[in-house]
Structure formats: C-alpha cells, structure tokens
C-alpha cells in the first residue's frame, strides 16, 4: 500500500512526491533530519526531538521551517493518514534548491519532507553482534545532518562480515554505533556511556535512559570506553529512536553474558517502553 508523504505543505501519495534535482540536500547533504518513534499511534519524545532539530538547524545557519505546534500537527497528521500504530516518522529539512554553488545562498525556501515507516519497536530482542571499525565521519557529529555516507558504509561493512552493526572507534575509544548511542555495564553494575561532545550525537533516547537509570539508583559514568572494556563487560546495549534499548551480545567476536541479553538491559528495555508510552503525545 502506498504511503502518504509530506512535501512542502502537501500530503501526496509517495509515487507523486518530488523534490528538485538542484536541492542542496541532494547535492551537498545540506540538511538536517529527525527520526521520531510512534507507539500506539502517538509521538514519542516530542520535546527532545524538536529541541534537537532547532539546535541542529541553528548550527548550520538555518531556521525552523514552521512553529513547533505546526510541526507537531504535521507529525500527527502523518500518523493519521498512514494509520501508523508503531514505527517512526522521518523529517528532513534542507536549505532548499538553487543552482549549484559551494557558497551557501541566503533566503532560499527550505525543502521540508516527512514520511512514515511502520516497524515493530516493542517485540522480543535477541541482541546484536557488533564489529569495531574506524570512525571516518566528520567532526560535528553532534549535528544531525543528512550526511550519512560514512555510517552507511560502515554498517554495510558490518553486515558483510555477518554481523548486525558496527561500533565506531576513534583514538582507541568507541564513539557510537552506525545510528545509535552505545553503553556497557561493568561487572560491578555501573553503566558507562560516552560523554557528550562534538564526537557523538546527543541521543534523545540516551537522555531519557540516563534519567531512568538515575531513578533506578544505578551508577552511571559518562566517559569514553574501549573495545577491550566492552569485551570484559557484563552487558552492553545501544539506544536509538528506531530501536529503543537494544542488547548487544557480541563485540568483535567476544560474547557477553553468555551471548544472551542480560538482566539490567532487559529491565531498561521494559522501563523505557513503559515511560515512552506514558509520555507520548
Ligand atoms: N539515528 N547516534 C547516531 C549517529 C544516530 O544516527 C542516532 C539516531 C543516535 C540515537 O539518537 P536518538 O536516540 O535521538 O534516536 C545516535 C536515527 C534513529 C536514524 O538515523 O535513523
């Protein structure tokens, strides 16, 4: 069945949705995106996603394409028109279309598109096997730009090796997964995840998970960790809007916790889903 997508103010069947070949998103990856989860037909983590969108746009000299309430309305309309119960909404805002020039033009009409992807987010999770790869991305990973070639190449490399995802490594320390934040749980029960700098994306799921972890009185250390530390950890997991909390059960061929999701990760999966349902809008 054809989806309804949003393109510059219009809701159209996906086959009819078009943007210009001169769009700077297409030619220069000059655009920002957000991916927001949908549970029970409701939007999850709205405030976090919209705040990060505004920040990312500002970092590359762009403005919000419409008011926050207008944007929420479009998200809700997309859920309704696509009968989306569970899955994600993708939003992309680019600087717009003009003749190709490295100099960024001012005053262009932005291109705004949204589409939905149905996906089961709450099912049973067996855990992911990851491989380390060098992080070859640019230096401003805190901005959610549509420049995703490096991450896409690295994920494809992991799949070629028969694994599920990559953990990117820079100067000896794990930065992120291809499209997720990464965590290890030490044998003493401490959760370690990389601190926020320009090296990683400030995940919206990460923020909520760390809040929940604190509420559960678990210890957190925000600092970089190595692949070796991960291989010696009791458990590991990753977070993203499209997969919530997901166990990682193998790192570079070394199984963690007997190769099955551990108890702390399982608890966090449950708690996060419960909280997301409550806070969705
Ligand atoms: N990616 N790090 C990177 C590099 C990401 O691309 C993502 C999300 C995250 C997790 O952020 P959040 O919890 O806000 O989803 C971390 C989305 C899901 C994507 O590109 O599809």
Image: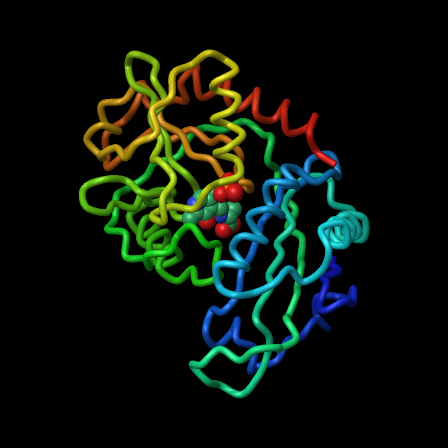
Q: Image check: 114 left or right of 198?
A: right
How is the model colour-coded? rainbow
Q: Quadrant of residue 153?
A: bottom left
Along the line of sight, which residue is nearer the eye, 166 or 211? Answer: 211
166 vs 218, left or right, is: left
Q: Is residue 187 above or below residue 85?
A: above
The residue depicted at 74 percent of the width and 36 percent of the height is: 281
Residue 175 is left or right of residue 70, and the answer is: left
Give left or right: position of 233 versus 211: left
How many numbered marks have been drawn onto this rendered protein structure?
A: 0
Quadrant in which the N terminus is drawn: bottom right
Q: Residue at the spot x=42%, y=50% of the render? A: 142
Residue drawn at x 63%, y 71% is 110
Percent across and percent down for residue 3 are 73, 58
Query: Is residue 179 in view from this perspective?
Result: no
Figure check: 183 above or below 135: above
Q: Quadrant of residue 234?
A: top left
Q: Position of residue 265 (x, y in %)?
A: 44, 21
The answer to whether any part of residue 196 appears in the image is yes
Relative image position of residue 174 (x, y in whole percent): 28, 40
- Residue at the bottom extreme of this rendering: 99
Q: Position of residue 221 (x, y in %)?
A: 34, 24
């Amino acid at each position: 069945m054809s989806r309804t997508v949003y393109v510059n103010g219009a809701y159209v069947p996906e086959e009819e949705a078009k943007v210009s070949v001169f769009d700077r998103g297409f030619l220069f990856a000059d655009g920002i995106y957000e991916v927001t989860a949908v549970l029970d037909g409701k939007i999850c983590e709205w405030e976090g996603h919209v705040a990060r969108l505004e920040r990312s746009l500002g970092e590359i000299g762009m403005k919000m394409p419409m008011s926050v309430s207008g944007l929420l309305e479009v998200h809700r309309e997309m859920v309704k028109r696509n009968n989306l119960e569970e899955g994600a909404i993708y939003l992309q805002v680019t600087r717009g279309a003009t003749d190709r020039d490295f100099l960024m033009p001012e005053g262009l009409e932005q291109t705004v598109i949204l589409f939905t992807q149905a996906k089961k987010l709450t099912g049973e999770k067996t855990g992911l096997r990851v491989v380390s790869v060098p992080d070859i991305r640019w230096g401003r990973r805190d901005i959610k730009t549509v420049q995703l070639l490096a991450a896409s190449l690295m994920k494809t490399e992991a799949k070629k090796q028969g694994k599920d995802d990559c953990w990117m490594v820079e100067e000896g320390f794990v930065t992120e997964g291809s499209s997720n934040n990464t965590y290890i749980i030490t044998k003493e029960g401490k959760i370690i995840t990389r601190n926020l700098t320009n090296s990683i994306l400030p995940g919206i799921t990460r923020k909520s998970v760390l809040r929940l972890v604190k509420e559960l009185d678990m210890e957190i250390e925000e600092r970089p960790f190595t692949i070796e530390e991960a291989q010696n950890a009791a458990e590991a997991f990753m977070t993203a809007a499209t997969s919530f909390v997901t166990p990682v059960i193998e790192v570079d061929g070394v199984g963690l916790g007997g190769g099955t999701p551990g108890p702390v990760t399982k608890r966090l999966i449950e708690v996060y889903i419960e909280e997301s349902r409550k806070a969705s809008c």
